[in-house]
Amino acid sequence: MSSGCPPQSPAVAKSEVAIAGECPLLAATFAYWDNILGPRVRHIWAPKGDQLMFLSDGEVTFLANHTLNGEILRSAECGAVDVKFFVLAEKGVIIVSLIFDGELKGDKNTCALSIILPQTELAFYLPLHTICVERLKHVIRKGRIWMQKGYNITSVLTLEIVPIMELLTSMKTHSVPEDIDIKDTVLNDDDIGDSCHEDFLHKAISSHLQTCGCSIVVGSNPEKVNKIVRTLCLFLTPAERKCSRLCRAPSSFKYDTGLFVQGLLKDSTGSCVLPFRQVLYSPYPTTHIDVDINTVKQMPPCHEHTYNQRRYMRSELSMLWKTDSEEDIPPDTLGPLTDTLYRTQVFMLKPGLGLRSTYLAQFLLLLHRKALTLLKYIEDETQKGKKPFRSLRNLKTDLDLTVEGDLSIIMAFAEKLRAGLHSFVFGKSFYTSMQERDVLVGF
């Protein structure tokens, strides 16, 4: 593969990242377009240790330069980040590249932040593509500020490149399987009401559905944590299960933004500290489940979550303008969570695991169809968004969603089908989670 590769420039800096386990990511690169020399690689990040295939620094440079070819006439809005996906079969690799404009040495340059993986990892990577891209987009926002201030962007990019390497490595060994045996969950005949209190499981599943299938399960016993993780994943699609992770013993993984369900172990003091920034940057609100003390908490609903997320992002970027170091960013502390009061009827289950699996499949199909019906209902009532929605009371009655909590669950399913639905239904005025609950109950 080295034939035809240009020699590496001595100016290219490289960071070797110590990763526990076999990292599927071959390298990450930061490159820019030089008006005299053409595409140039400024920094390479490579995992240290065992890899699925080996790339020399010259080969990495050659591949990184490829991502900027054809970008000299790039015309994009200010601040735009374009995502390019290359499959180079002749090289046996895939490259995910984020193209953006930035200032280097006082000049405006077209830049590319790229990750390189073996082509054999394509099926593994695709479900995680959106997670990686969204996280890289945000670190690019911060990096562009750093560049404009004349600082070294690689220090900012490293803060996200390394966690993504760790995320991909952990998903290779601890991702939830696409097909889950119900015997490995608490919905097994011998487990309901035995190893897991039934009322606690009611609340956990209800809140999990209300937060669009996004949940964190914490505890001291890895087997118990993983059993709840698998149970919640029964209510996800196969693609969403590929974006969920079991806990690892004895050392726990760190929280990762973007995963649907993830298990985390408590430390020796019996606590599990969650980073507020990463939890808030999750695409959906999150349910927090503690299997040691049987508590279920949830973040505010989708529209409030999005509002808080954007406000915090603006605050974080504004803070970067005013500081020379990220150490001055406000510390991460988890925001307020609310108790889950709603329940589902998922425990109207027949004996026998075969019938139980069929019931769950039909239950999820029913929720999906009701979400589609809700979207169609709102489209008709608002003339496809041309008018404000004012008939929440009629919607609950017509779609048989009068039972407390039912509308929240169907709205969560519909939100995944049509992003921004919560904000549209509840109007331009901002509702807090308690005000929204009053609205849902009052209609």
Image (cartoon, rainbow, N blue to C red):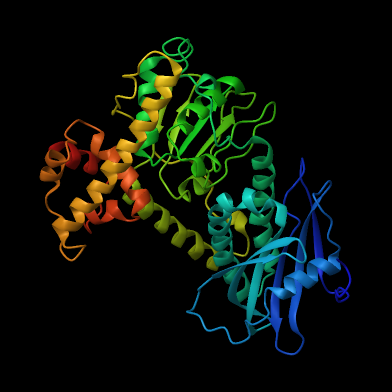
How far across and how far down the image is residue 9, in percent? 85, 75
Given residues 222 and 305, the one toward you in this image is: 222
Q: Is residue 274 left or right of residue 324?
A: left
Determine the residue positioned at 75% across, 70% down: 63
Query: In which quadrant of the rendered view does residue 307 lie?
Result: bottom left
Q: Is residue 388 visible?
A: no
How far across and how far down the image is residue 323, in percent? 58, 64
How far across and how far down the image is residue 51, in percent? 81, 49
Judged from this view, the residue extending furthest toward the bottom is 36
Given residues 202 and 103, the one toward you in this image is: 202
Determine the residue positioned at 55% across, 20% down: 224
Query: In which quadrant of the rendered view does residue 88 lie?
Result: bottom right
Instruction: Specify the quadrant that holds the C terminus.
Output: top left
Query: In which quadrant of the rendered view does residue 69 lie?
Result: bottom right
Give the answer, above or below, for where 29 lies relative to 219: below
Determine the residue positioned at 52% across, 29% down: 229
